[in-house]
Amino acid sequence: MFVSTLALFFFTATGVSGFSVTTSTPDVQVKENDGADLKCSYSADFGSNTRVEWKFEDRKGSQTYVVFDGKPTAQYTDRVTMYDNNLRISKLTRKDTGFYDCEVSGNSKYGEARVKLTVLVPPSQPVCRVPDTATTGRAVLLSCYDPDASPPPIYSWYKDGVLLPSNPSTISSFKNATYKLNTQNGNLEFPAVTKMDSGQYSCQVSNTAGPPQTCKATKMEVRDLNTGGIVAGVLVFLLLIALLAFGIWYAYKKGYLPSEFLFLFDFGYIILQSHHYLNWVTIKTIHRIDIIFLIVTQKCQYFMATKTIELLRK
C-alpha cells in the first residue's frame, strides 16, 4: 500500500503521467464510398504551440503522411479535412483500410494514438485452383483466394457439398483425414492423397461486410501410378531405337552411307541416351565380325547431320 501511494505521488509530482494522446474512435468500420471521422485529443502539457500530424499505414506496412504541417498532403487534398485535431475522410475505398496514427509533439515531448480503419468490402467470387487429376501418395495443394474482401475473409472448403472441418481430428467421421486446411489464406493441402480424396471441391469466402461467395465446384480424381503404361512406353521406345539402328545399318550395308557414320567394336555395348525412360541399355552381340554397335547420342546426331550436309554439297 505504501509503495502504491509513493508511486502515485511520484507520477503526480513529476508530471510523467501527462503528455497523453488518446482517441475515442480506436476501431472504425465503414462501408466503401462512405466517410469516417477519426478522433484525436491530447493533454494540455504539450503547450499552445502543439504540432499535430496524421500518418497512414496500409496493410503491407507502407507509411505515408495524410496531414503534414497542418495541411492535407497532395493525394488527400480533395477528400480530407481536419477539425479540432480530428480527421475526416470522405469517399473511402478499400485501399484506405489500415492504421491511422495521430502524432502530437510540443514542449519537447511526443505522443501518439492509433486508429484502426476498416473499409467494408463484401466477398466476391473467389479464384479456386483444383487439379483435375492427382497420383496416389503425392502431395497436392488446392488454393482459394479473394483479393478484395475487407475485413480479410474466412475460407471454407467443401467436398461433394460437405463442409470440411478446419481440424478434422476433432470430428469422428473425419478422423482418418490427413488434409491441412488454413482458413486464413485458403490453402487446402494433402501431404499424400489417396483415392478416398477424390471428389468435387469448392471454396467459400465470408466476412462481416456481405453474403458469402463460392467458386464453382471442380472434380479432382486421384489415380494409382500407371506402371503398365510406363512399361509399354519403354518397350515402344526400344522398338523405335531398334528400327532406327537397323535402318542405319541397312543403309550402310547398301552403300548409302559413308563409313564415318558407324563405329565398329568387338563384343561391345549399344549406349542409348533417353531423357524419359532409360540411361543405359545393353544388347549382347550375336555375330563377331559384322555386328555394328551404334552410339546414339546428341553428339552423334549432330555429327550425322553435319556429314549429311557435307555429302549433299558434294
Image (tube, grey):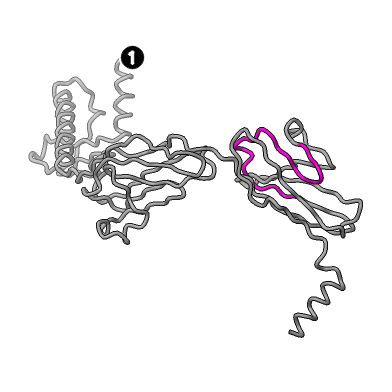
Residue 201 placed where, x, y %? 31, 41
Q: Quadrant of the C terminus?
A: top left
Viewer-closest of 158 and 178:
158
Indicate whether residue 82 is drawn in magenta: yes
Q: Is residue 310 left or right of residue 154?
A: left
Tag 1, which secondary structure? helix
Indicate whether residue 197 is drawn in magenta: no
Viewer-closest of 58 and 13:
13
Q: Quadrant of residue 75?
A: top right
Q: Quadrant of the N terminus?
A: bottom right
Q: Is residue 58 left or right of residue 55?
A: left
Viewer-closest of 89 and 158:
89
Q: Quadrant of residue 117?
A: top right
Residue that lies at the very extreme toward the left in this rendered image? 286
Residue 276 placed where, x, y %? 26, 39
Type of the residue with mark 1: Arg
Q: Is residue 178 left or right of residue 265?
A: right
Residue plotted at (45% across, 43% down): 206
Residue plotted at (50% across, 44% down): 208
Q: Quadrant of residue 258?
A: top left
Above or below, 180 relative to 270: below
Residues rendered magenta in the picture: 81-102
Residue 11 placed where, x, y %? 82, 72
Residue plotted at (23% across, 50% down): 194
Q: How many marks?
A: 1
Residue that lies at the very extreme toward the right in this rendered image? 48
- According to the picture, the residue beneath numbered tag 1 turns out to be 313
Residue 130 placed where, x, y %? 34, 39
Q: Is residue 179 left or right of residue 112?
A: left
Residue plotted at (30% across, 15% down): 312
Q: Residues within 10 Å of mark 1 (few under 14, many from 20)?
A: few
